[in-house]
Image (spheres, rainbow, N blue to C red):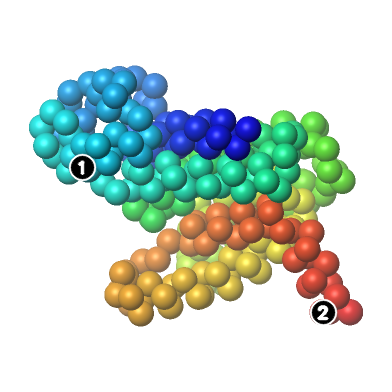
Amino acid sequence: MNIIILLFALLFGSFLNVCIYRIPMKKSIAFPPSHCPKCQRTLAYMDLIPIISFLFNKGKCRYCGDKISWQYPFVEMLNGIIYLLLFYHYGSTLQFAGYGLLSSLLLVISVIDYDHQIIPDRLNVFGSILGIIYIFIRPDSITSIDSFLGMFIGGGIFLLIALLTSGAMGGGDIKLMAMLGLWFGWRYILMVTLLSFVIGAVLSILLLVLKIKSRKDAIPFGPFISISAFITILYGNELFNWYINIIL
């Protein structure tokens, strides 16, 4: 079963790469078929095998020799790892399916935000629609009231930060937190908020130390939110109980 999950996740990761490339340019994710962005040659099936095609073609287009970014196999492999972790944690459940879709969406959001410093509204809207559907079919104890409170609290905290800091948080981050509030409810969106600032501080320092980013570069916050959300998906109960025990 693990192999089936991994193969599906890798193939789905290939589709996520299409979304990452086309959505910021406001292009259709369905048409035209996958093609080389330089020579425009439509890719054959053998060019679309996740990871293997990239390695076999030595990271280049088979037709024009143009280099292909390592981001493509990275996204495919990361999506595979994410699905395996979720399957190990939740098994063949509705939570696995729901959180799998959410995690893939967060992966797309993170890469787009890192590359372009934007979080397209259509992604937050799509995530919100999925979140509303999940409210009525979810198997856990989070109620619809919890979810909508989470939406207002998650978005509200980041809106307040944006107002107090003259726009340090972008509108996409605010909408992303509101969307995640629907999924997590008010308790766990507070956990996501806390984790996002801790992870953001640590990773920002690391990026500066490794000279991947300079002090003048904008460091997008969307990836930090996404990492925090995924940690909460896997260990939210444990982290929440640990945090409450410390307070008490």
Q: Does residue 224 appear to the left or right of 147 in the view shown?
A: left
Instruction: Give the residue at x 33% y 75%.
Output: 210
* Nearer-N-terminus badge (1/2): 1
Dot label at residue 246: 2
Element on which disc 2 rests: helix
The crowd level at tag 2 (other Cα within 10 Å; few <14, some 14-19, many 20+) is few
Mark 1 vs mark 2, foreground winner is 1
Residue type highlighted by circle 2: Ile
Instruction: Give the residue at x 20% y 42%.
Output: 58
- 8 or 173: nearer the viewer: 8
The percent position of residue 40, horizontal first and vertical second, equals: 17, 26
Specify whether residue 155 is in view: no
Give the tally of numbered discs: 2
The percent position of residue 46, horizontal first and vertical second, equals: 29, 24
Looking at the picture, does residue 6 appear above or below residue 160?
Answer: above
Dot label at residue 13: none
Location of mark 1 (residue): 58
- 145 or 231: nearer the viewer: 231
> Which quadrant would the C terminus be assigned to in this image?
bottom right
